[in-house]
Image: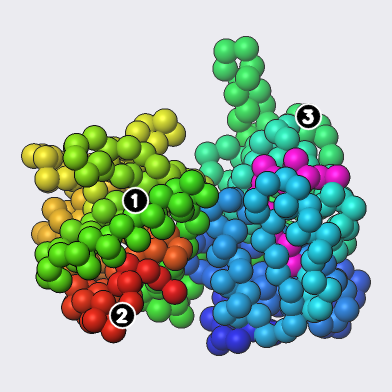
Amino acid sequence: MPIRARPYDHQRRAFSFACQTFGLAGHDPPTSRGVALLMEMGTGKSLTAIAIAGRLFLESKVERMLIVAPLSILGVWQEEFLKFADFEYSLVILNGGESKKIEKLRQMPTSGLQVAVINYESAWRLEKELTAWDADLIVCDEGHKIKTHNIAASKCMHRLGAKARYRMLLTGTIITNKAIDVFSPYKFLNPTVFGNSFYAFRNRYFDMVGYGNHTPVLKANMAEELTRRIHSIAFRATKAECLDLPETTEIVQRVELEQQARKLYQQLVRDSYVQIKCGEITTANVLTRLLRLSQLTGGFLRGDETDRVERVSSAKLDALSDIIDSAAQEGGKLVVIVRFLPEIDAITAMLERKSIGYALITGAVKDRDEQVRRFQADPDVTVFVGQIATAGLGITLTAADKMVFYSLDYSMSNFEQAKARIHRVGQRNPCTYIYLVTAGTVDEKVLQALRDKANLARVLIDEYWTGKNPFETP
């Protein structure tokens, strides 16, 4: 595997499966030009996909790779390539306005494997330009995003996929509640598996029942064939089956502020520095300025003179929305740890819009035991939202093996106690911790201090005395 890491056994097996399916390393001819990596969150499907792309490139099978992913994780691919790719490549994230995206694509460096990363909405809007770019390999990340066969994004991926020499689809699982959702992703991957006609597929595998015959129900005598065809070009890996995974895995997912929010943040950094220069350099003063910066990275800003809170960014919320969708796709539960109440209000409102059942603990919640019981025992309650200062002690949340830190406070004790809610007696799976970090902000300093078990206020004050603005991030 052309990667700078020691792969786990399931990653080696996924790599071998894809290479064999694609006809690489002596397995000519290929049995399929499309492969699905059905690997749960935390099992390393992006690393595996990079290794497969690298092998295709090194065997001169591909020169151009297009990755289509949710907007919130485009930067993750850049970081993963930088960390793992052990082959020459050039990677460009297609962001900005439409004309800027097109210019970036046209000016793509030509050294090594050329990798373009774009989000789903931009892909269908720039389909003409992407078609002309003519990628040899297309990766559809979080492939459940194209489960509806007749939306613009899905139709675009079907057409782009039909031209590409190789295709990969990455997702936790291809089926959640509706088996009929497999058609669209497989039309992208390999139309010979289920055909090009949605209605022919539906008529073969499903009975239409209910009022108006609008509800598809899988025919009992076709379930075995459907499953066999799904797995004919798919590699499946669950965390429970990956026995060599470490007990805990930590993922830092960086989020980019919108342009206007970035300007507000940078101005607040300058103002904060001026204020501490003009006042006494104390722990309280430094942490007070840090507090406002931390609030902004989560999307909210409270006025200096009033208690009015204004939403200034949705970047973190959008990233969390994608993570929740992925967890729901896998059929698992998720714990979200949050610091500020406006963030909690925004998260719970988002969950209600998605019709996702959740439990909640904040300082104002009285029935904490009942909230924990619902999360642990009720299959319809799939998300737990907890305020870090109040939900970190004395509760067990082992129904989940994934925890997202939406925002952090500066307490090492709160941090470690929160992590221990899922990683404790009763947990049967390896645990995954995801840190949502707004790139180039104090989020990075806060997380680093917690990981280093350092006194954050002392670190910032020491930076100030060396002539630096302690709120700036390199």
What residue is drawn where x is 55% and y is 57%? 73
| Numbered disc in front, either 2 or 1 | 2
> Mark 2, mark 3: which one is toward the viewer?
2
Quick one: label 1, few (<14), some, or many (20+) residues within 10 Å? many
Query: Residue beneath label 2, please?
Result: 467
The type of residue carrying mark 1 is Leu
Which residue occupies 67% across, 26% down? 207
Q: State how far apart marks 2 and 3 are (Cα).
A: 68 Å
* Left or right of 193 in this view: 331: left
Which residue is at the front of the view, 267 or 394? 267
Q: Is residue 322 visible?
A: no
Q: Earlier in the sequence, mark 1 or mark 3?
A: 3
- Mark 2 or mark 3: which comes first in sequence? 3
Circle 3: element type? helix
Range shown magenta: 115-128
How would you rate the neighbour count of disc 3 (Cα within 10 Å): few for under 14, some for 14-19, many for 20 or more? few
Q: Residue furthest left?
A: 366
Q: Secondary structure at mark 2?
A: loop
The amino acid beneath tag 2 is: Gly
The residue that label 1 is drawn on is 296
Q: Position of residue 310 (x, y in %)?
A: 32, 37
Residue 450 visible in this rendered orientation of the protein? yes
